[in-house]
Every structure is written in C-alpha cells, then in structure tokens.
Image (cartoon, rainbow, N blue to C red):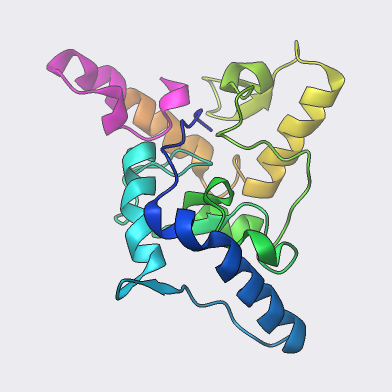
Amino acid sequence: MIKMERAPVPECLKENYKQWGHEYALKTRNNSAYRFKWKSWKGKAVDGLIKPELVRITKNHCSYCDSYPLGVASQQTIDHFRPKKQFPFLVYVWHNLFLACNVCQSAKQDYYDKKLLKPDTTSYAFEKYFVINYKTGCIEVNPGASVKDQERARLTMKVFGLNKRGRPHSRLREYQKYQDLCQKGYCIDDFSYRFFM
C-alpha cells in the first residue's frame, strides 16, 4: 500500500454527498434487498465522473495492493472503504472511495474494522507498518513497529489478501523487470508494487 494524497472533492460529490447518502440510507432501511446504483449528475453516472480522478491520484494503481495497470490484468473498481451496508450515509463521501483492483475488492468484500490501514491517512507510511522479504516476495509486519501497529499491519494483509493468490511471485517478477528497465528511462510509476522497488 502506497501513501495516497487526496485531490479536492469532485464537484458532483461536494454538492450532493449528504443528500445522496441520506437517500440511499432511507432506501436500504425501507427495503433490505435494495441494491446500490450510482446516482447521475448532469446526465452522467457519478462513478464515471469520479473514477478518472481516482485513476489520476493513484496513477492507475490499486490503492491497496498497488497492482498496475488496472483494467488490463485486473478490473478497476471503486471500493467503499467503510462498506455501504454498514455505513450507508458514507456511500458518496470522497474520503471513503478508493480505486481498487477486483482481487482486493473481492478479498475485502463488506469487511470493516477501524484498525484497517487506510492509504490516504496523514500518518500512514508503508515502512511504519511493513517490511519486504526480497527472497519470498512477501510483505511482512515490521518487527520494529509497536504492538498496536503490528496488529493493524497483520489485519490489513489478511483482509486484502496481500500475500495470497500468487502476489509474492508477481512482486518478485516485477522487481526483476524494474531492475532490467530502470536504466532505460522507465519511471517507477510504470511498475506494480512501487513499495517493493
């Protein structure tokens, strides 16, 4: 997970997030089977308006595992960090929306715990919570972190499945590619798992 700097709230959300959140909360309260559908603003679906901004601020990397480019090897999704079912009033809150790969989103599903690390938090830094094992490709808990921070790191790795589904091997492969190409003018943002480089 790379630290993410939030851009200002998009206009469509700034003007409407409270009202739309209240409407969604009311619909789910009255009908437990109600399924979320993005609102429209000026004739366009809101997810289509905010996704380009999320792509820009993440440089088309998953906000959680940092895989790249999204839309090729894995699908681009918009994750509600605090899930819609538990936090219906937050469905259109900008700081609750993250660009994610479908692998991270399906691993996380509707799980939420306040200990889960959030990449746009001011105090978040990869090295504070994690270290990298360059032999295995695994992300590991930083042994120098506090007990509380180690617990948060373990939880985050588990919830997003950061060491599952062939991800350690993918990181090692990407690291080798980076070693081969960085001398040829490639930028670190051209690679997945930038925290690994």
Q: Give the quadrant of residue 43.
A: bottom left
Say if residue 141 shows up in the picture: yes
Residue 127 at what x, y percent from top left? 60, 17
Say if residue 74 shows up in the picture: no
Q: Is residue 195 magenta-colored?
A: yes
Task: Using the image as rendered, state which of residue 5 and residue 115 is in the foreground.
Answer: 5
| Residue 91, above or below 113 | below
| Residue 93, above or below 138 | below
Q: Is residue 167 magenta-colored?
A: no
Q: Quadrant of the C terminus?
A: top left
Task: Using the image as rendered, state which of residue 121 and residue 9 is in the foreground.
Answer: 9
The residue drawn where x is 40% and y is 66% is: 46
Q: Give the quadrant of residue 18.
A: bottom right
Q: Give the quadrant of residue 184.
A: top left
Relative to residue 60, is residue 18 drawn left or right?
Answer: right
The residue drawn where x is 31% and y is 32% is: 191
The residue drawn where x is 51% and y is 28% is: 3
The stretch of residues the image draws in magenta is: 177-197
Task: Using the image as rendered, state which of residue 15 and residue 77 is in the foreground.
Answer: 15
